[in-house]
Amino acid sequence: MESNQANPSILCSPEGSQRTLYPYVTGTSVVALKYKDGILMAADMGGSYGSTLRYKSVERMKPIGKHSLLGASGEISDFQELLKYLDELVLYDNMWDDGNSLGPKEIHNYLTRVMYNRRNKFNPLWNSLVLGGVKNGEKYLGMVSMIGVNFEDNHVATGFGNHLARPILRDEWREDLSFEEGVKLLEKCMRVLLYRDRSAVNKLQIAKITGEGITISQPYSLKTFWGFSAFQNPTAGAEGSW
Amino acid sequence: MSKLAMDVPAKGGFSFDLCKRNAMLAKDGVQLPPFRKTGTTIVGLIYQDGVVLGADTRATEGPIVADKNCEKIHYLAPNIYCCGAGTAADTEAVTDMVSAQLQLHRYHTGRESRVVTALTYLKRHLFSYQGHVSAALVLGGVDFTGPHLHTIYPHGSTDTLPYATMGSGSLAAMAIFESKYKEGLTRDEGVQLVTEAICAGIFNDLGSGSNVDICVITKGSKEYLRNHLQPNPRTYVTPKEYTFSKKTEVLSTLVTTLKERVEVVEAGDKMEE
């Protein structure tokens, strides 16, 4: 592990600044989908330090401006850095005071440029970002990876969510989901992630963006089911096997 | 008197003799050839009367589909079947071997084979090869103690589960199982759920594809539904055949008969010694 203190000799030498080589405190998957009135996004509140679940109240979804919501998985400190950049961006936009405001498409584009640029300097921001928003009635949901790959889709997921949540979403997502159906679908995905992702915590938030505004729910936990009779005595009838 | 060093028959298991040589070669920069994962989705689940096993039918060699309709559900005994993921040769060979051992065991005991017997044969073999036999198996069957479903990993560990998935598409299939499995499924619900799980693997994992094979095992009977579902038909087939309109004309015909150049010898003495 490298020390992150500013070391003058390193900064002056040709191998100048240090680069991000591995993430330290990471967040796990974010899952999001478009529904009838806007976007729904879910993320749990865990920040893992390697294999320890160290922080259990990390908010990995934040509203950006009036129209967008950013969710991030990966290195938490890089996410916080991105929030600073976006704060500045939104501030400058507000200072124009021209009645227009940055929409999700613009912020998605900005994030893509930032991520791709950092990747080209071999100093990436170690995140997978999900950007969703509604502006002028148009819903937008996109994703940017840490190397700058970006795309737009009706449902996205990061990290483990790609393997576990996307098959479910591909099967069951429809154009005109109501709010309750959307939340149920997201909870289904988050439950599977809770069962099968080792860095998942049972404390999640669901965020909703519509034309009216952004709300992020209070943290809550999902009900899990462990009562299969096969789990009570797994090796009944197969004595000697584990 | 020379002592025969090979008095005792060679014991099975992994021989570590070449490890030192491999380490030396690795230090000199010689790379081991990479193991080829064949990419698969295999699943099994227990329903109220027995076991349903499912598998996709794609066998890959790196990025190429080597066999687009292979059989991944292997026969072990009339009441026991095994799906195999990993290196195709390994799964084929190990299931063949254990199938033969089970047959001999049946003759020896005069009874129907039990699933734990197959499990123990497979796990002992795989463990003794320390994971180098790259076979990940989903073993299912019904014997007189009831329906059983086990997963066996290449290193020899096993799990006994009500529903299981293995292979590169296992996460997609497990997502379906975790969200939809419940106890006491009927046969049709079980087959439907297994088909959905394999389809999730086929459409969301690049290492799996083509068709869905199903095997339903209950007490006293089994149904092997080869290509139960074919969700990837050839879409663009030319409706008309190839026609060759211009035929070559025959200008003239000349037939030359073959001349005999071999003399037939009478009273063939040459053949008799």
Image (cartoon, rainbow, N blue to C red):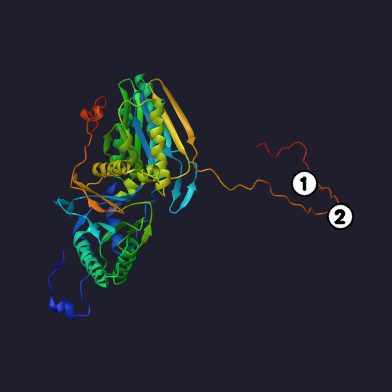
Q: Is residue A192 above or below residue A49?
A: above
Q: Can you give x and y, in whole percent of width and height, for residue B115 in the image?
A: 33, 27
Residue A6 visible? The answer is yes
Image quarter in which the C terminus of chain A is found: top left
Q: Can you give x and y, in whole percent of width and height, for residue A82 in the image?
A: 23, 65
Q: Is residue A236 left or right of residue A37?
A: left
Confirm or deny contact between disc 1 and disc 2 (CB under 8 A).
no
The quadrant where residue B55 appears: top left
Amino acid on which the number 2 mark rests in the picture: Leu
Count neighbours of disc 2 (C-alpha within 10 A) and say few if under 14, some if 14 to 19, many if 20 or more.
Answer: few
* Residue wearing tag 1: B262
Q: Can you give x and y, in whole percent of width and height, for residue B144 in the image?
A: 33, 20
Residue A20, label in figure: none
Q: Nearer the viewer, residue B93 or B64?
A: B64
* Residue wearing tag 2: B251
Residue at horizontal 34 percent and vertical 20 percent from the top: B109
Amino acid on which the number 1 mark rests in the picture: Val
Residue B129 visible? The answer is no
Identify the subunit bearing mark 1. B
Identify the subunit bearing mark 2. B
User: Are discs 1 and 2 both within one chain?
Assistant: yes
Kindly state the secondary structure of the residue where label 1 is placed: loop
Pointer 1 or 2: first along the chain = 2
Image quarter in which the N terminus of chain A is found: bottom left
Q: Can you give x and y, in whole percent of width and height, for residue A202 in the image?
A: 19, 44
Kindly give the residue lying farthest to the top in the view shown. B110
Q: Is residue B186 left or right of residue A221?
A: right
